[in-house]
Amino acid sequence: MNTAPSVTADQPNACYNIAAVERDTGLSKDTLRVWERRYGFPKPQRDQHDERLYTLPELEKLRLLRLLIDSGHRPGKIINQSAVELTRLIAAQTPATSTPPEIAVIIDHLLQHDVDRFRNALLQALMKQGLLRFVTETVTALNHWIGEAWLVGKVAIFDEHLYSEHIQNILRNAIIAQPGRGSAPRVLLTSLPGEKHRIGLLMVEAVLTAEGAACVALGTETPTIDIKDAAPAYAVDVVALSFSSAITQNAALAGLTELRGLLPEEVEIWGGGGALARARKAPQGVLLLRSFDDLRYALERWRVERRRR
Amino acid sequence: MNTAPSVTADQPNACYNIAAVERDTGLSKDTLRVWERRYGFPKPQRDQHDERLYTLPELEKLRLLRLLIDSGHRPGKIINQSAVELTRLIAAQTPATSTPPEIAVIIDHLLQHDVDRFRNALLQALMKQGLLRFVTETVTALNHWIGEAWLVGKVAIFDEHLYSEHIQNILRNAIIAQPGRGSAPRVLLTSLPGEKHRIGLLMVEAVLTAEGAACVALGTETPTIDIKDAAPAYAVDVVALSFSSAITQNAALAGLTELRGLLPEEVEIWGGGGALARARKAPQGVLLLRSFDDLRYALERWRVERRRR
DNA sequence: GTGTTCATATGTCCTGGACAAAACTAAGTT
DNA sequence: AACTTAGTTTTGTCCAGGACATATGAACAC
């Protein structure tokens, strides 16, 4: 059907090499190749040098697959369904949270590209709810909504970028404005290389600061060795790592295990975020936080235990 | 020599598998394997299943190599030198600048890992100098100093991370606190994929906002195609791109040229940052800004020209 | 229900060959 | 001296297909 000339014929029938697909889907090259071998999907065309060229629809379907696999489906069961069916599956598993009205307004301004109104709507939500509720309810919901809307093509990448920048502005501002300075525990906050999402990290920082902990935020992508050196330098009691779903659950657990081996026992390690939401068991000596309630509970527990000694 | 038992014998002779090394050095698994094949380094031990196990010294040397390669050295020439020689090479390429006194205090707190004092020193400088001078003098000097000190190993990566986070906090806070909202020109602010430095971008945003322009900040690493779509969506007059010296001058110029081809003529393109500081001629239809003075001048020029029409 | 055992599904690692793009070198031109 | 052009070397990425550890789910026993 689709012979060579058709590629140049129509629109830019944009093609992606395997590295681009790895970058855009988070699926490793090895995984992409082994799926092709085992399941027959994706089955990319080849260039004159026999290298894989993936099409945009393939890439989009791969993203859907990734999302479903992250939330518990098995590759072999779903890989041969059509993109439409996959979309339906995704819709089915989101427990019909029709966009809550309070975030609908915010989203609306974002989609209209009305920067000022968007910013004001966010600020208003923050004022009305207070930092804690704003983070655990509104920002969580917004993140989730935007992630899915982007998948379906409802929002553009640059909308997401703008969203991310403004949430950062607001959270950082709110964290600074926090009254007290915080004392114990001292928590080192960062993510491992490959994990670039800053918002999750800032949300945790906001909650911890609000609860009176002292945060040392290192931003994203700190190699484990550097975390090893940073923990004593800043005399922290806890190292908290954030993993969004940009990273594999396995990769996240491997990182946590490695770090546990590097840090002295008395420094606790907490891990949280989308990638770990459905992890069964934590590595030895690591605490998995599956929600912000878990985070607050962990804080409480630390304080109680510390008092005992 | 080294048979199985010796691994468990001593201290935790911490070993890293190939995925961990990829994560912490940024060198791909393929590259690591091909270096071993071609140059004989690194030559990791193997576990019982013939999988590579890298040692900590190997990992550290790999990071030095990465650093030198990024700044222009060729792998084949340096890969067989010792870690000490590599460190010397790194030191040699940085022309040891002395610390200007006004930033010495700030740096001192950073090196002492005294987070609170560090933050306060920054805030104090901001208050004393005002946003414009703070950005163009203090932050510029700090960036420069820290970049070099890191190369020489005077500050750890995590110190740099902490620095970056705090500067971001302070700049974002200051930008929000700016009195007016800004009107014209409307400037889209971002960087191209591969350029991760956020501080330069925030500095520009601070200056522009202070001068009464309206900024739409998209954070870092926006692909050119998305910039093409974003410019009309946000109705901007100017697209400003920041290039730190993490990227080569050629790559920066190529990016600017490509973008020029994508955007309509009436949208101006401004490019600035370390990578372009010594560029001779700008691509057709692109304005190169080599200093913050250039930036303010460009702003002024835009306003004058706009008034004429 | 809860725990144990086994089969299957799945991701990651391996080797060694191949080649394109980038970087360098050298010779020729303005 | 500065800039092209063309040839050569270096270097990163890709490929195939095999292997195996670990996670998951099913069947079964308590």
Image: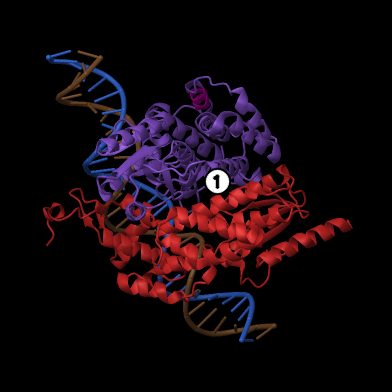
Chain colours: A purple, B red, C brown, D blue
Residue beneath the point at 28% across and 49% down: A263
Q: Image height check: is C22 above or below A31?
A: below
- Could you tell me if residue B283 is visible in this image? no
Placement of the N terminus of chain B among the 4 image quadrants: bottom left
Q: Which residues are magenta?
A: A85-91
Residue beneath the point at 49% across and 36% down: A63
Mark 1, residue position: A15
For the residue labelled by badge 1, is the local secondary structure a helix, a strand or a loop?
strand
Q: Main secondary structure of the magenta part?
A: helix
User: Between residues A135 and B124, which one lies in front from this camera angle?
Assistant: B124
Residue B119 position in % (x across, y down): 50, 54
Placement of the C terminus of chain B among the 4 image quadrants: bottom right
User: Between residues B184 and C29, which one lies in front from this camera angle?
Assistant: B184
Question: Residue A56 appears in which quarter of the rendering?
Answer: top right
Image side of residue A257 versus residue A71, left or right: left
The residue under label 1 is which amino acid type?
Cys
Question: Residue B274 appears in which quarter of the rendering?
Answer: bottom right
Q: Image height check: is B270 above or below A61?
A: below
- Could you tell me if residue B6 is visible in this image? yes
The residue most toward the right is: B308
Question: What chain is tagged by disc 1?
Answer: A
Residue A302 position in % (x across, y down): 32, 36
Residue A199 position in % (x across, y down): 51, 41
Q: Is residue A86 magenta?
A: yes
Q: Residues within 10 Å of mark 1 (few under 14, many from 20)?
A: some
